[in-house]
Structure formats: structure tokens, C-alpha cells
Image (cartoon, rainbow, N blue to C red):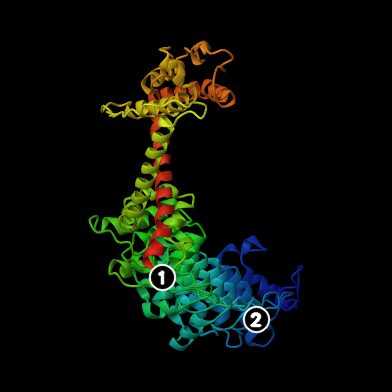
Amino acid sequence: MKKLLDSGADPNKRSGDEKRTALHWAAFYPFPNPKLGDPPKLKALLSMLIDLVNRREVDINSKDINDDTPLHIACMRSNNVAIPILLSCKDVLINKRNKHKGWTPLHRACQNDNERVAELLMKKKPNCLKRCNDGMTPLHLACQRGHDRIANVILSLCSDEDRIKILAAKDKNSYTPLHIACEKNDIELADILLKHDADPNMFNEKNLTPLFIAAKSGFVKILKLMLKRGPIDDIKKCTDNHKHNALHIACKGGHARAVKLLLEYDAAEITACNKDGLNPFEIAIKKEQKDAAMAIVNSEKWRDALMNVTTVKRKKKDVVEAVFDCCYKANPDDPNFEFLEDFDSEWLNNRIAPVYSIQNDCLHILANSPNADLLQHPLATALLDLKWKRYGKILYYSKLMFYILFLILLTSFALTVQSPNSNLCMKVFENDNDTVIDCFPGKKVVVLALLLVFAFAFPFYMIFYDIQGKLEGIRTPFNTPWRTIYKTITMAAGHLRLDSLLHQDNQINSPDVQYPVVAFSLLIVFVVLMPILFINLLTSLAVGDIVQEIEKKSDTYRLRLKLEFTLPVEKFLRFK
């Protein structure tokens, strides 16, 4: 180097595609000359060049094609030997921005994870607020690259005033360094920023705070760091453009652990509503985020969140069941109907409540939703039983008694009425029939079978009864109700014998039956329908599992019918 300079070589001569000077290449160490890999030799070379700088023969701030100075190059290459020598020159521009990205030497240092280079630069008090073309400060760049040690050096060595400013500085996306750390889920970096008093409630252009970003992505560890730092009161006041708080955002993303953490620290109002009037629990239900909804239901604040549960009844079965469990398990002897019956307190205290629509009744909504089997839940059953006892029971059994009375009178009339073609007196018989059902597993099948037999026996008796034949002593299968029942049973077993169904009197030109169309139509229905019904009964007796499933569905259907009967009666009696 000395010989070249003595021979008149120009130290400012540029070479390479980057148009760099000898000072640039010396700062670039170890490329392009591997022989310069020995630091003492490099140090001697740089000292000679610095002497030229001091004599104004070499420009310490000369720029290559990218506007990078030798200090830029040294910082980019983490050249710990060249940087102190370059910084020792009083004319070096430590805040010079290059043309390519607008980076200062400190930006270049933050590009690499070299703590020593950052310390050397920070001791020279550079402008830490200098921004590159993307609007990023050196701290932004360190956070973006995940260089937490560099970030710590910058924050530790800058002035208190600069520290406050760079922590609040925003890039072109209006992100603070803490926004970037939270978005990248860099726990160590976030911890460093928070220790230096970074504000977790700073908003970006989308009105998202760093805490919102962590809640949105479900980054629980970073979220916990920010909640510990607080202040909680300020966190609770923050909302985005849609008036979502942190709990809304966590529920929307379905992050159950984040929801639990926010509730644990009381960092968001559980009853707060967004622009659409939905609280966090309703957001979880709307977005079908079961885990987030369950986290709220299982928390101590479930009662506050569930003040409006209409949407729940139409959604996830597990969530609805959990809500019902909360209301029931607290006191099974006195279940809480607050979230099922809007007028619970009024009508239990015999007060007059405003008229309401049956369509909005919780049980009605539940009965017409995919979760209809939840009507069998103890809470729903208890409420329905209470409504039934207060309103439906009296009217139902009154109607049933009137119907039974009508049926008895109609049956008695049908069995005793005289044939329209007969002018003979009929004898009225009184029959006392006692039905005893023994308690055995197939009792329901037996009862149903007997009902089927009776259903056909009485019409057979009325159609085939021949009073003329009875007076003449001709015995037919339908002379008495008991013979008719017996004959119907044998017919069900397959013994039809058509000739026994016809009249056997001696009258000339007498018809076989009085009502041929009705009689033979009834016989056809009997022959087709009776075997099918009996086979179904026997099958249901043999296959228990199927019966249990059918019984479960029938129980739900029974409750729905009971509900459909009770609600109109309740509305009429309650608000009359």
C-alpha cells in the first residue's frame, strides 16, 4: 500500500461494479483480497488511509454507487476492526443515509445481529430517530429482523428523551416497534421493549394496539407480558374501528387461552358491545368459535356475558348445554331460569309483564332448532314443568275429560243403536270391563295390540251384528261384543273364514251384510294393515336399542307438543 502511494497511486480511484474506493474495500474486509484477513495488517492499512483522510487526500464519506460510505460498508460487514478506526475520524458522517434504502450506518448495523457494532455506533450518539425509506427507525429494523440484543443496546445507550420517542415512533404502516414484536410473536424482544416502558396501547392506522395484535393471533405469552405491565384501566378503554375490545378480538379468532387470560386480568369489559351491538360471547357464537365461548361460560363472569342468549339457543349444542348446566348446577332444587325466561322474576311474583311473542320464547326457539333434544335437559324440563303446572295442566286435563266423556257416549251409542232396517226392540246390555295390565317388559306392546284389536272389533260388531239371526238362535261370531273381540283376535292370527262373516238366516233374498261397501272395505283394510302393525309391535319388543332411540326421540317430540300446547295458554292466562 505504501509503495503504491509512493508511486503516485490515487487512493480515491474507484473500482468494481459498485464503484468503491480503497477505503471502501478496506472496510469491506476480508473480500476481495484474502491476504487482508489478518486484522493487524488490516488495521495498519486503515491507519494509513485515515492519515490520508486527515491530510484531506481521501474523503472519509466518499460514496459508492449505492451512496454507501465506508462506515456503511463496515457496519454492513460487521467489521469490528474498521469501525473504531473510521469512527475516530472527526469528519465521519454517522447519520448519513444511503440512496438504495435510505439506511444510516446504524440501520446497517441493525441489519446484522452484532451487538459490538451497535455499541460502537451508539457511543457516538447517532440520531436514533433517523428513518429509512420505509419510515423505519433503526429500532424498527432490529425488531423486524428479530435482533433483540441490538434493540436492547439501542434502548440502553440512548437518552431518555430519545427512548420515549423511538418507542412511540411509527413506520409507514403506523407500526411501533412493539407492534412488530407482537406480530412476530418475539417474546424476548417484546419483554425488552416493555421493560423500557413501551406502550401496549399505541394504535396503528387500523386502530389496532400491540395487545390487540397478540389477542388476534392468540399469542398468549406476549399477551401475558403486556397485561402484567399494564395499566389495565387503559387497556380496558381501547377499542378498534368496529368498537371491538381485546376480548372481542380474541373471541373472534377463537383463542380460548387468550380469552381466559383477558378475563383473569379483567382486561376487557365482558358486556361491552361492538357497532353491531354484540358482546364478546355473542361474537364467539356468531363466528362458531366453540372453545372461546366455552371459556366465557366456564368463567366467573358467565352471568354478565349471558344476559342475551337468544343467539346461543340456535347455535352450538355444547355451548347451550354448558349454559344450562351453569344455571342448573348452582341450585338444582331452585334452578335459575333467568337466561331461559325473560319474565322469570315478574311472573313468579305474580306481576304483570309486557306482552311478548311466543316466537321469541327460549323453549320455543330451542324446540325448533337442531338442539331440540336439549328440551330433556333438567333446566328446560323444570321450566316446562313449571309452565305446565301453572297454565297447561288444568286446561289439558279438562279437555281430556270432555273428550273421554264424548268417546264413551259415542261408543255406547254405536254399540246399542238399533239397525235402521230393523223395527225390533233391542235389549240393552251393560258391560263392565276392567283392564288389568301386569307389570312386565312387554306391557306396552300388549296394550297397543289390544287397542288394535278393539279398534277393529267394535266396527266389526256394528256392521256384522244380525239381530234377526240372534232371535232365531243362529249363532254368528258377532252376536256379542266378546265373541266379536275373540273373532277379531283369531282373524288377526290368520283365520279369516269369509263364510262366517256373512248372515246365516233363512230369509229369502236377504243380503249377506247390511252395508256391503263399508263391510268389505273394512275387511280389506284389516287384512292389509293388521299383519303390518303386529309385525312392527313384535319387532319393537325384540330390538331394545332401537326402541330406546325411538323412545328418546318420542320424548323430545312429546315435550315439543307439550310446549306448543302450554305457551299459547300461558300467553292468554298471563296477560289477560
Rounded to the nearest angstrom, the CA distance separating label 1 from label 2 is 30 Å
Q: In this view, does 449 lie above or below 23?
A: above
Q: Earlier in the sequence, mark 1 or mark 2?
A: 2
- Counting from the top left corner in percent of width and height, residue 1 is at 67, 72
Which amino acid, mark 1? Asp
Instruction: Write the residue at 41% across / 51% down.
Output: 318
Q: What element carries label 2?
A: loop
Q: In which quadrant of the rendered view does residue 544 lie? A: top left
Q: Identify the image quadrant of the C terminus.
A: bottom left
Q: Is 428 positioned to the left or the right of 95 in the image?
A: left
Instruction: Write the residue at 34% across / 70% down.
Output: 265
Q: Is residue 114 visible?
A: no
Which amino acid, mark 2? Arg
- Counting from the top left corner in percent of width and height, residue 312 is at 45, 59
Residue under circle 1? Answer: 191
Q: Can residue 36 be seen in this view?
A: yes
Residue under circle 2? Answer: 97
- Counting from the top left corner in percent of width and height, residue 161 is at 46, 88
